Image: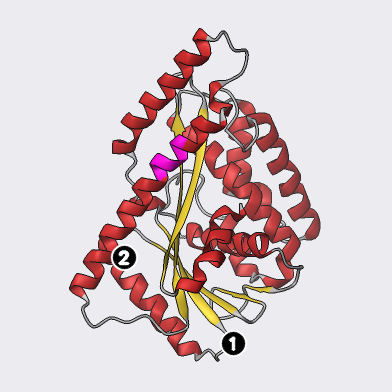
Amino acid sequence: MNDIVNKGSLKDILEDINNLINKIEELGLEKKIKNTKVYKWLSSLENEFNKNSEDDIKRLIKLNKYRGVLNFIIKNSSNIKPTTIKEIISGSELILDDSDKSENYLFEIDIADRITKSIGRGDGLVDLNSNTDIIFDNKIFVECKKIHGENSFKDNLKKANKQIRNVKLNLDQTAFVALELTDVFNKNDVLELSHKVSEYFRINYKELESSGNYTNDLNFRKIIQSLFNSKLEFLFQNMIKEFYRKNKGFKFDDHIIGVFYQYDTYFRTSTSDLIAIRGATFYPLKEESRDFFMRLVTGI
């Protein structure tokens, strides 16, 4: 298996996670980190990585995502609840999907990381200690929700709206809802098209006798990403359309500028290259919010 496109090789990921785990232990953020699922995933892949094992691929994708999250925790630990840190790295190493409750906390940190990187401001401005999931610079308030189905979408959208309304924001403060849709993202219908694109590039690289790996081709990556992002938008639009149909009197709080939503998945080519796919887009409620959300989408 070759590189995870844009994310580094297997060796890079495992080395980074090892260093981050040691740093967390040194700082005393989690003294028993070597009993956690993150360390067990790391140890498992260090001992052996089977590129044909779906479980091993899922462990690798998880660790790749944890790199950014653990980095953020180390840099911002004073602004994060200790229970949040513990929840993120605890739990069963056997659960490799998005059903574990730790994924909720992981999502909050992930969005906080997006905000700080996209806005490009200094440290110490992110607050993950309050009742609101994320507060940035006391001006941007975020409620993060993981979606597991149609009812989850309906209930969590209403809940996030109510939570933001109850904060009673002033005129200088704004808010948005962040949704994690990985658990309801069915990529099967996109895979057929993705494999055709993959074969097209593989064959042409072979005919050119190119020494490069076609999966690193910028055009190839853009097409694959675009296919998956289109699927993400179709998914959200169908859910929000059905939501409004069943909740005709619903109105978002005036301070909410839109809904940001994302997913994380992967695509494995016929040549066993693994491509981590991280997609995100947004549903603006105020036209002037588009630039802000575009920075969030492209921030990391």
State whether residue 31 is above or below residue 221.
below
Q: Residue at x 54, y 44 (%)?
A: 62
The residue lying toward the viewer, choosing from 156 and 117, is 117
Q: Is residue 281 magenta?
A: no
Q: Is residue 227 magenta?
A: yes
Is disc 2 in contact with disc 1, using a CB cutoff of under 8 Å? Answer: no
The label number, if any, that marks residue 152 in the structure image: 2
Q: Is residue 152 left or right of residue 104?
A: left
Q: Which residue is mark 1?
A: 172
Residue 73 found in image quarter: bottom right
How far across and how far down the image is residue 81, in percent? 64, 71
Question: What is the magenta segment's predominant secondary structure?
Answer: helix
State whether residue 218 is above or below residue 213.
below
Q: Residue at x 45, y 28 (%)?
A: 268
Q: Is residue 161 left or right of residue 104?
A: left
Q: Which residues are magenta?
A: 223-228
The label number, if any, that marks residue 270 in the structure image: none
Q: Secondary structure at mark 2?
A: helix
Q: Residue furthest right?
A: 26
How far across and how far down the image is residue 8, in percent? 65, 34
- Can residue 15 be seen by looking at this rendering? yes
Q: Residue at x 51, y 45 (%)?
A: 93
Q: Which three-letter amino acid code belongs to the residue tagged 2?
A: Ser
How far across and how far down the image is residue 249, in percent? 23, 83
